[in-house]
Image (spheres, rainbow, N blue to C red):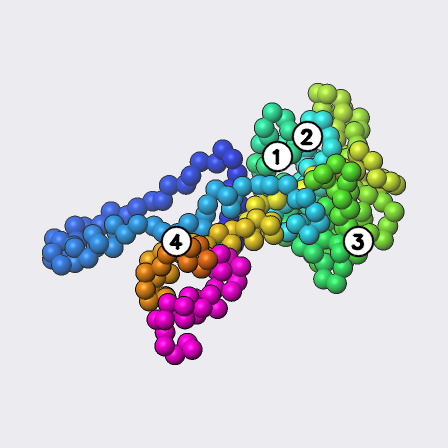
């Protein structure tokens, strides 16, 4: 199930509870006890963990997936954002630790894009919050050559250069300052796609949700496989196990040959006479 995005500083929404009549008065003591039992059950759903909702840096093109934040090489740090009409602009970042762009997280849904690999290619498409594609002009209803970008790893670890036209054009997404009479500083940061070569201004840091990063997902799945108690192992084998046997079975569960090891432990313990 797709989970809604949450941002730092958001206040948790309180559920409105309806007031019900006393169950014991309305339905009798048995109904009241059942209601009490059902409402005191602990919530064991741990899907919405802090780790899943945290934002991390994509280290390689193979990491890029799901909701992403495209951080630009500007001062102050900005990211690529889009309004509801598909107009793309540089949005100043607020969720930073000591101004470090490597710690950036979105604070506005307009800053979030959904990255998807274009089928049959090495390039990516980026869909805005309003459902349209493109990070130079987010107004396309479907993915075409113009809405495909090749992510080339940069010289600085954790950075990329986004080549336009799916990598077929000698042009890159970049950020540049332009004069502006409407800004107090007299300048505005522009998102462009006409840089002819890779440089500092084409540097893009891609921040993503931890739950979509392959290595983190694999690590989480490994930890889930390891979560089996000694009691469960002994029930599977049918006898008490020594420390070495417990470690061996947990290691086998992690490495994927668990059932074979359980059978072997059974045989050595002469528990399962049909295992011979």
Which circle's residue, 2 or 1, is located before the other in the chain?
2
Instruction: State yes or no: discs 1 and 3 in contact (Cβ < 8 Å).
Output: no
Which is more foreground, mark 2 or mark 4?
Answer: 4
Dot 3 crowding, Cα within 10 Å, few <14, some 14–19, many 20+? many
Residue assigned mark 3: 166
Based on the displayed image, in which of its 4 quarters is residue 120 positioned?
bottom right
Q: Position of residue 47 (x, y in %)?
A: 45, 51
Q: CA distance from mark 2 to mark 3?
A: 26 Å
Instruction: State yes or no: discs 2 and 4 in contact (Cβ < 8 Å).
Output: no
Residue assigned mark 1: 104
Q: Nearer the viewer, residue 222 or 187?
A: 222
Q: Residue at x 24, y 47 (%)?
A: 19
Q: Nearer the viewer, residue 19 or 81?
A: 81
Instruction: State yes or no: discs 2 and 1 in contact (Cβ < 8 Å).
Output: yes
From the viewer's perspective, tell me whether residue 187 is left or right of residue 259.
right
Q: Residue at x 60, y 50 (%)?
A: 215
Residue assigned mark 2: 77
Based on the displayed image, in which of its 4 quarters is residue 32 positioned?
bottom left
Which is more foreground, mark 3 or mark 4?
Answer: 4
Q: CA distance from mark 2 to mark 4?
A: 53 Å
Q: What segment is highlighted magenta in the picture?
A: 251-276
Q: Residue at x 19, y 57 (%)?
A: 34
State the SS at label 2.
loop
Which circle's residue, 2 or 3, is located before the other in the chain?
2
Which circle's residue, 2 or 4, is located before the other in the chain?
2
From the viewer's perspective, tell me whether residue 42 is left or right of residue 225.
left
Residue assigned mark 4: 243
State the SS at label 1.
strand
């Amino acid at each position: 199930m797709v989970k809604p995005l949450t941002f730092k500083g958001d206040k948790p929404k309180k559920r409105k509870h309806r007031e019900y009549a006393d169950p014991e008065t309305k339905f009798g003591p048995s109904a009241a006890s059942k209601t009490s039992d059902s409402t005191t059950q602990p919530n064991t759903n741990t899907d919405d963990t802090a780790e899943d909702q945290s934002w991390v840096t994509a280290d390689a093109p193979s990491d890029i997936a799901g909701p992403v934040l495209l951080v630009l090489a500007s001062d102050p740090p900005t990211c690529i954002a889009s309004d509801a009409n598909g107009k793309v602009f540089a949005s100043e970042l607020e969720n930073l630790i000591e101004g470090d762009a490597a710690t950036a997280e979105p604070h506005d849904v307009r800053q979030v894009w959904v990255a998807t690999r274009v089928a049959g290619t090495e390039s990516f498409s980026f869909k805005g919050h309003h459902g349209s594609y493109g990070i130079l002009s987010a107004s396309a209803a479907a993915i075409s050559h113009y809405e495909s970008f090749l992510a080339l790893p940069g010289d600085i670890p954790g950075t990329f250069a986004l080549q336009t036209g799916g990598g077929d054009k000698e042009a890159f997404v970049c950020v540049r300052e332009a004069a502006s009479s409407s800004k107090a500083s007299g300048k505005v940061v522009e998102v462009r796609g006409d840089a002819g070569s890779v440089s500092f201004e084409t540097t893009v840091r891609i921040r993503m949700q931890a739950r979509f990063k392959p290595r983190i997902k694999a690590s989480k799945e490994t930890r889930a496989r390891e979560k089996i108690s000694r009691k469960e192992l002994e029930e599977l084998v049918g006898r008490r196990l020594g420390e070495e046997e417990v470690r061996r079975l947990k290691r086998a569960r992690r490495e994927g040959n668990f059932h074979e090891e359980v059978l072997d432990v059974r045989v050595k313990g002469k528990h399962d006479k049909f295992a011979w």
